[in-house]
Image: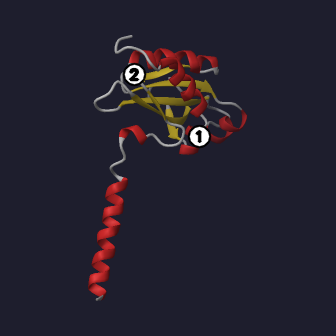
Amino acid sequence: MKRLTASLFSFFVALFFAGCLTTPVADSGGVGAVTVTNTSVNRITAAAQNVFAQSGYSPGPVNYPAWVAFDKPATGFSNAMWGGYDRKTTIRARLYMTQIPGTNNYRLSTRIYAVANPGEPGFEDKHQLSGIWASEFGPLLQKIKTQASGASRGF
């Protein structure tokens, strides 16, 4: 009886974790992620450049069409926490654009990094911040969604 109970328990644990690993793209991205409908990567990128610029960010590194990044100089606490006195530090928001299979819809999510010595080849030091930081970009992603939704397949 103990063997049967242990086997059933193991089966249900495996089934639970298998289900967790098959999250549809439309529901992925973590806290603050949004789905932009009927759009293109070009429209999303143009909207993101506009929205992030309004919030004081400048364009950063790009891995088009997978993601684009935006940088903003760190201030006070952020600079002391991740940069120190002798290094310039930037907060980098990397915007991921994942197409939902079979549609013209994209799932937008962010990953946030503290980057010391940004733009200095060989000296740039990047640390990913926790997912809670990404949730702060939810309102920006909503603005991008509003500007980029409902576009045709092209630009």
Q: Position of residue 23 (x, y in %)?
A: 37, 47
53 to 88, vertically: above or below? above
Kind of residue indicated by mark 2: Asn
Q: Nearer the viewer, residue 94 or 45?
A: 45
Q: Nearer the viewer, residue 134 or 139?
A: 139
Image quadrant where one finds the N terminus: bottom left
From the viewer's perspective, is 137 left or right of 85?
left
Residue occupying image coordinates x 44% and y 15%: 43
Which structural element holds mark 2? loop
Q: Would you identify the image quadrant in which residue 54 lies?
A: top right
From the viewer's perspective, is 77 left or right of 115?
right
Q: Position of residue 125 (x, y in %)?
A: 50, 35
From the viewer's perspective, is 154 left or right of 44?
left
Kind of residue indicated by mark 1: Trp
Q: Position of residue 42 (x, y in %)?
A: 40, 15
What residue does disc 1 label?
133
Nearer-N-terminus badge (1/2): 2
The residue positioned farthest toward the right in the image shown: 76
- Is residue 117 at least partly visible in the picture? no
Residue occupying image coordinates x 45% and y 18%: 45
Q: Residues within 10 Å of mark 2 (few under 14, many from 20)?
A: some
The residue positioned farthest toward the top in the image shown: 155
What residue does disc 2 label?
38
> Separation of disc 1 and disc 2 at Cα?
28 Å
Q: Would you identify the image quadrant in which residue 133 lies?
A: top right
